[in-house]
Image (cartoon, rainbow, N blue to C red):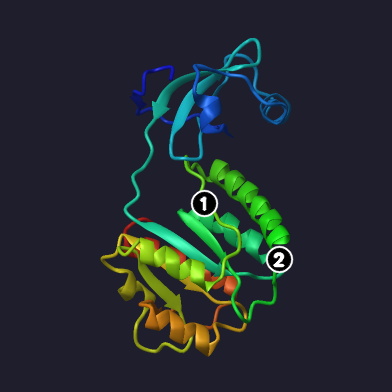
Amino acid sequence: MGAGGALASMSAPRHRLFVPPAQLSAQEVALTPAQARYVHGVLRLGAGTELELFDGLGASYRAQVAADGRLRVGERLVAPIRALEVVLVQALAKGEKMDLVVQKATELGVARLVPLAAERAVVQLDAQRGGARAERWRRIAQEAARQCGRADVPRIDEPSGWDGIFALLQTDPERRGLLLDPEERELRLGAAARGAPKLLLAVGPEGGFSGAERDRAIALGMLPVSLGPSVLRTETAGLAALAIVLHVHGELG
């Protein structure tokens, strides 16, 4: 890399561009046609203009547009250290609600988003449609990361069933699983999230989790938690929950 991995403390350039890690392996970046259209056509950046490149894995670099249209890669920029890592398990929702959740959860700092094929979810996707939707959500997350200044892009999974969620928790025993449950009256989300730097938040569909889903999740170690007396829509609940746990850990507000 241009500056041998040195970290820059100056403010980052205003314009940002996602560049995959393999493309960032040299001191100069040859833009793809889509990247060139964005840099030269949309942003209208001329020779000598600075911009920030980020690789989606947490690294970002200062760069400059060269006379030949390539990008010269400079020093690595300092990225903030997050004290909390959150996996958001969001029950599939209809229409553009999932797009909204992916976009806003990315802006808030979610590490991973797992769409859940819950029993009462209105939307049911087969493997082909689920894969296509996941690709769409990844593009949304990538653009949201560019807009909000993140150097990393959250992992967006293809839709999963409960077995995948429980396997995730079993392979990561330090992660605390919290199940948003409107019927819970005692344990609030903020209290349950304290002291756990790794969380999994499970958000149900419009009709809520079924009794069988709730019982199984609790039996396998997840804690039912409350957001308070209001009943929120599924696309609101997950984002509100994410904001609450970020605030508890000093990441927001």
Q: Front-most of 229 and 22?
A: 22
- How far is mark 1 from mark 2, CA to CA? 20 Å
Residue 91: percent from left, percent from top:
58, 71
Q: Which residue is mark 2?
A: 126
Q: Position of residue 9 (x, y in %)?
A: 35, 29
Q: Secondary structure at mark 2?
A: loop
In this view, 65 is above or below 186: above
At 53% from the left and 62% from the top, the residue drawn is 114
> Which quadrant of the structure image shows residue 245?
bottom left
* Neighbour tally class for label 2: few under 14, some 14-19, many 20 plus, Cα within 10 Å: few
- Which amino acid lies under the numbered mark 2 shown in the image of this protein? Asp
**Residue found at the very far top of the displayed protein:** 67
Residue 54 position (above or below residue 188)? above
**What x and y, as percent, mark residue 157?**
56, 57
Residue 240 seen in the figure: no
Position of 130 with respect to 83 (left or right) is right
* Left/right of residue 240 with respect to residue 10 in the rendered view: right
Dot 1 crowding, Cα within 10 Å, few <14, some 14–19, many 20+: some
Q: In the image, what residue occupies the spot 64% across and 47% down? A: 139
Q: Which residue is mark 1?
A: 155
Residue kind at label 1, given as amino acid type: Arg
